[in-house]
Amino acid sequence: MDNQQIVVIDDSPAILLVMRSMLQELGCSNVVTSSNPMKALEKITKSPERYSAIFTDLNMPELDGMSLIKELGKANFRGGVCIISEMETRVIELAARIARQHKVNLVGNIAKPVPLNEIKRTLDKVKALTIRQGHCPPDSLTVRELEYCIEQGLVEPYYQPKVSILNKRVEGLEVLARITKPGVPNAILPYQFIPIAIRHNLLDALTKQLMKRVIEDFPRLQSEFGDNVKVSLNLSPSQLNEQGYPSHLMDTMDEKHIHRDNITLEITEEFALEDTEQLETINRLRMRGFGLSLDDFGTGFTNLNQLRTLPFTEVKIDRTLINDIHQDQFNQVVVETLVQIADKIDVGLIAEGLESFEDLEYLGRKYQDLKVQGYLICKPKPLDSLLYWYHSWAHNA
């Protein structure tokens, strides 16, 4: 993100001057401003990968914000887009829906005059988007290092609980991959190796090793959380093919006598699920008893009407829509829409990435049937540490 440009488009020179100043104050040195949306769009469409974020006015001559979003979709722009214009609730909801249909990442709207903290919040969303899209950070493992870690069995499951917001019960556990090296105190985090695994076709090998460790942990998990404990594993859309990991997973569950309804498969929403083979695999997994969760929902491009027909049992609201929801109107409107849809199609809903008491209080007041997951409740932990946390949590709940 640091090497990419941020574009601000507005027909007001004063707004452009203020936005440039505030973005620079927040550490963004590579800022481009334009009072001509047509010229700005022309530059962006020539090299969309050069830009990480676009802040744009809604009402502009020649080309308004909605038309700009449509053209950005045609240009395959994958950065974040933020509208800097006051919008009423229904306009926000429709704008988010339109952006989704055009495969554009609309990350917020900011009312004028533009507050500094709103820009910072938007930049945080753009940074999360950049990481999720697989851009490798400087501290990533090399492919050779990752191959070595897999060969040596250094991939370890960390568990993060999903908790009912109403009664504080642990309703499930998500498995998150970590790499732990002997003598190194801190585990290596997914953003440091998952993009490399995807890029070099190591994701299946990594996931199989992770699953092996989870199976070893299963007797203790059931002893502590009950026989019906729900354990969630992440799958990439690229793994949803007939001959790949899903077949291995089904065979492994049967061989180890683990009921398939104990396993929920979380499938990221980063890319649209449109491939026929992917859709067939999703249906087959559900038919054979696995729970299905749509992960990172609200940031990808799944058509809302398509969601009504896919057999998901759970939808997870992405952390970028949960962080600061108590004061972020855009997030509030989008989450309200997702809650209404989830209620109509009768799927469980989980807010992930919860980090503040203010957000917890807001969600608890608005959505008592929600489940929550995040650092505020419990960080991902290896099994022994998780159980230590759980005994304390259950005692105080």
Image: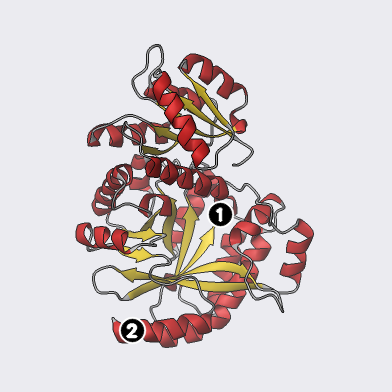
As helix, strand or loop, the secondary structure at mark 2 comes to helix
Percent of width and height locating residue 4: 61, 36
Circle 1: residue type = Ser
Question: Mark 2 or mark 1, which is nearer to you?
Answer: 2
Quadrant showing the C terminus: bottom left
Q: Residue sitting at 46 percent across and 17 percent down?
A: 35
Snapshot quadrant of residue 56: top left
Left or right: 79 in relation to 201: left
For the residue pair 240 and 351, the one nearer the viewer reads as 351
Task: Residue at 35%, 59% (x, y): give it.
Answer: 351
Above or below, 95 against 208 in this view is: above
Q: What percent of the width, then of the height, locates residue 243? A: 63, 56
Task: Give x and y (percent) for residue 206.
Answer: 65, 65
Task: Give residue 146's mark.
Answer: none
Above or below: residue 181 compared with residue 369? below
Q: Residues within 10 Å of mark 2 (few under 14, many from 20)?
A: few
